[in-house]
Image (cartoon, helix red, strand yellow):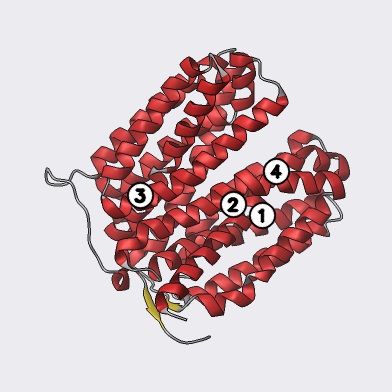
């Protein structure tokens, strides 16, 4: 097998892992009522399975990645994926809510490592000029979990129960374990700079503003998306089948956007790609209220909305990897934490607006936050009066080596 084919197969494998991890996180929303009734708890309490999951994922990820920095990357991925499988099996066997919650938190901890290592490995096994596309493909796997994984998982959970769903997800993840050695090279773990030096790097304007751009973008995005159904009902009085069609189109647009963002980041390195993507994302949101006059116009704007929602992500992470090659894994982990925090903040802001009867204003607030993200992204590229775009080699960021464990 040629090196190019092996690298391509490896990136697709990592995208498949991202799909499984994304499905496991998001599918709970679709089966929340089933879980609550089956475990005899309120839906509010069952919601802890999502909120605490996001908290452990966001806060625990950087700590776990730092603690495992010296571990060979493929071995670390195998270990994290094994824990992920076992934790999902424990979820399926949960005799009560406390057991299920503990198992889900273990799933969250392992998933945070799987995603970060998947992205760093994707960067490691492709040529430098294809880094953005590799990150974009992993992002597309996560978005595909929203389009395909969550609806299918919700259907399976409704038909055969949530225990069968968790069993199937554990089995799906387990099937990828034998493929890790075949498709992925060994990549030496690097400890990176000392913690204080990493904190100083985080305090640098270009790094802090890049993370802040991701945080603000996700806050603006989920101010709107969390309450997309009430918004669609209030705007067009859509029925459930048409709402499902809008959400399907939205998800497909996200897959396209992730792939497009990766390619654009390879062609135009530095903050330029994600700043332009953020501006177009804000523009699409401002067009949403005007497009809600007809279903056709709405579908067109929803596609553009999700395409430009996903363009900045791969570009931001590629920029962070190339700006801080020695601590790339930590930077990616911090960025995924910023995304998780943005999701939570956006849901909170949206809830406040909806409770005040301002559901139709959601796109304007979301667009305003995303414009702030674009400003932050522009500031991240300003150093000594000029934009910065680091051009380190792949070996500087992550150093692959041949051989088996």
The residue that mark 4 highlights is: 151
Q: Nearer the viewer, mark 1 or mark 3?
A: 3
56 and 400: which is toward the camera: 400
Q: Are marks 1 and 2 in contact (CB under 8 Å)?
A: yes
Residue 331 placement: quadrant: bottom left
**CA distance separating discs 2 and 3:** 25 Å
112 and 307: which is toward the camera: 307
Give the mark nearer the N terminus: 2 vs 3: 2
The residue that appears at 72% across and 59% down in the rendered structure is 169
Q: Which mark is residue 400?
A: none
Residue 115 shows in this picture:
yes
Label 3 SS: helix
Q: Are marks 4 and 1 in contact (CB under 8 Å)?
A: no
Give the mark nearer the N terminus: 4 vs 1: 1
The residue that mark 1 highlights is: 105
Label 1 SS: helix
Q: Residues within 10 Å of mark 4 (few under 14, many from 20)?
A: some
Q: Residues within 10 Å of mark 3 (few under 14, many from 20)?
A: many
**CA distance separating discs 1 and 2:** 7 Å
**CA distance separating discs 4 and 1:** 23 Å
Give the mark nearer the N terminus: 1 vs 2: 2
Q: Are marks 3 and 4 in contact (CB under 8 Å)?
A: no
The residue that mark 3 highlights is: 315
Give the mark nearer the N terminus: 3 vs 4: 4
Q: Position of residue 162 (x, y in %)?
A: 81, 50
**CA distance separating discs 2 and 4:** 25 Å
Q: Are marks 1 and 3 in contact (CB under 8 Å)?
A: no
Q: Position of residue 180 (x, y in %)?
A: 56, 75
Instruction: Please give the count of numbered marks on the rendered protein.
Output: 4
């Amino acid at each position: 097998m040629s090196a190019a084919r092996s690298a391509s197969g490896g990136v697709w494998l990592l995208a498949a892992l991202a799909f499984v991890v994304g499905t496991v996180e998001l599918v709970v929303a679709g089966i929340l009522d089933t879980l609550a009734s089956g475990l005899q708890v309120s839906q509010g309490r069952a919601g802890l399975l999502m909120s605490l999951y996001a908290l452990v994922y966001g806060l625990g990820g950087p700590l776990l990645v730092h603690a495992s920095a010296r571990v060979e990357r493929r071995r670390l991925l195998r270990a994290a994926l094994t824990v992920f499988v076992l934790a999902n099996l424990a979820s399926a066997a949960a005799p009560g809510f406390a057991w299920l919650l503990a198992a889900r938190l273990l799933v969250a901890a392992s998933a945070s490592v799987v995603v970060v290592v998947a992205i760093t490995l994707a960067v490691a096994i492709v040529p430098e000029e294809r880094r953005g596309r590799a990150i974009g493909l992993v992002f597309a796997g996560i978005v595909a979990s929203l389009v395909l994984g969550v609806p299918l998982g919700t259907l399976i959970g409704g038909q055969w129960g949530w225990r069968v769903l968790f069993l199937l997800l554990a089995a799906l993840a387990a099937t990828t374990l034998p493929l890790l050695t075949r498709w992925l090279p060994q990549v030496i773990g690097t400890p990176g700079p000392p913690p204080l030096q990493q904190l100083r790097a985080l305090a640098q304007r270009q790094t802090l503003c890049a993370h802040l751009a991701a945080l603000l973008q996700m806050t603006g995005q989920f101010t709107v998306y969390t309450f997309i159904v009430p918004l669609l009902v209030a705007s067009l009085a859509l029925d459930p089948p048409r709402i499902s069609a809008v959400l399907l189109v939205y998800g497909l647009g996200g897959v396209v956007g992730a792939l497009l963002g990766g390619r654009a980041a390879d062609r135009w390195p530095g903050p330029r790609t994600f700043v332009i993507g953020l501006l177009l994302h804000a523009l699409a949101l401002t067009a949403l209220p005007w497009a809600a006059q007809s279903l056709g116009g709405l579908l067109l704007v929803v596609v553009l909305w999700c395409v430009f929602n996903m363009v900045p992500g791969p570009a931001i992470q590629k920029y962070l990897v190339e700006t801080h090659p020695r601590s790339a894994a930590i930077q990616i982990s911090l960025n995924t934490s910023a995304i998780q925090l943005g999701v939570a903040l956006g849901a909170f802001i949206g809830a406040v607006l909806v409770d005040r009867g301002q559901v139709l204003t959601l796109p304007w607030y979301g667009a305003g936050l995303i414009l702030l993200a674009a400003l932050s992204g522009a500031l991240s590229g300003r150093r000594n009066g000029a934009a910065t775009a680091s051009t380190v080699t792949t070996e500087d960021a992550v150093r692959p080596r041949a051989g088996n464990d």
